[in-house]
Image: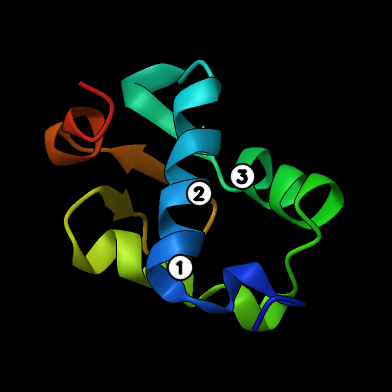
């Protein structure tokens, strides 16, 4: 588990939310998925198997995940994580 810290979906989701918060949303609050993917993979060394965190964040109501898979939007519940 220590080799893959983001295998815990909640821990991965919280890190994803940190990356989402760091990005300045564009039109309609969109955060393009690559703005989360790149730092999670390049900086945090997460693997695709660790991406249960994205669905965890969606299921918690922290992010709205667009059906196209190209972007997310942070919800008020997601913003409240940082209040």
Q: Give left or right: position of 26 versus 28.
A: right
Q: Residues within 10 Å of mark 2 (few under 14, many from 20)?
A: many
In percent of width and height, residue 82 lies at 28, 26
Separation of marks 1 and 3 at Cα, in angstroms: 11 Å
Q: Quadrant of the C terminus?
A: top left
Closer to viewer: mark 1 or mark 3: 1
In percent of width and height, residue 62 lies at 24, 48
Query: Going from the N terminus, do you reach mark 1 or mark 2 first?
Result: 2
In the picture shown, does residue 58 fall above or below 27? below
Numbered label attached to residue 16 = 2
Which residue in the rendered view is the most extreme toward the front? Answer: 2
Q: Give left or right: position of 19 versus 76.
A: right
**Pointer 3: what residue?**
36
Closer to viewer: mark 3 or mark 2: 2
Separation of marks 3 and 2 at Cα, in angstroms: 6 Å
Residue at 48% x, 76% y is 8
Res. 68 in view: no
Instruction: Tell whether label 2 touches label 1 (CB within 8 Å).
Output: yes
Q: Residues within 10 Å of mark 1 (few under 14, many from 20)?
A: many
Instruction: Tell whether label 2 touches label 3 (CB within 8 Å).
Output: yes
Query: Going from the N terminus, do you reach mark 3 or mark 2 first?
Result: 2
Separation of marks 1 and 2 at Cα, in angstroms: 7 Å
Q: Give left or right: position of 70 versus 49.
A: left
Q: Quadrant of the N terminus?
A: bottom right
Name the secondary structure under disc 2: helix
In the picture shown, does residue 5 fall above or below 27? below
Numbered label attached to residue 53 = 1
In percent of width and height, residue 20 lies at 48, 35
Residue at 82% x, 45% y is 43
Residue at 17% x, 30% y is 80
Instruction: Tell whether label 3 touches label 1 (CB within 8 Å).
Output: no
In the picture shown, does residue 14 fall above or below 25? below
């Amino acid at each position: 588990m220590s080799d893959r810290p983001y295998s815990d979906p909640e821990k991965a989701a919280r890190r994803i939310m940190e990356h989402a918060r760091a990005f300045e949303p564009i039109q309609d609050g969109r955060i393009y998925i690559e703005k989360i993917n790149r730092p999670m993979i390049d900086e945090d060394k997460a693997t695709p198997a660790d991406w249960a965190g994205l669905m965890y964040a969606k299921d918690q109501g922290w992010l709205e995940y667009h059906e196209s898979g190209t972007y997310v939007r942070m919800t008020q519940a997601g913003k409240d994580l940082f209040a």
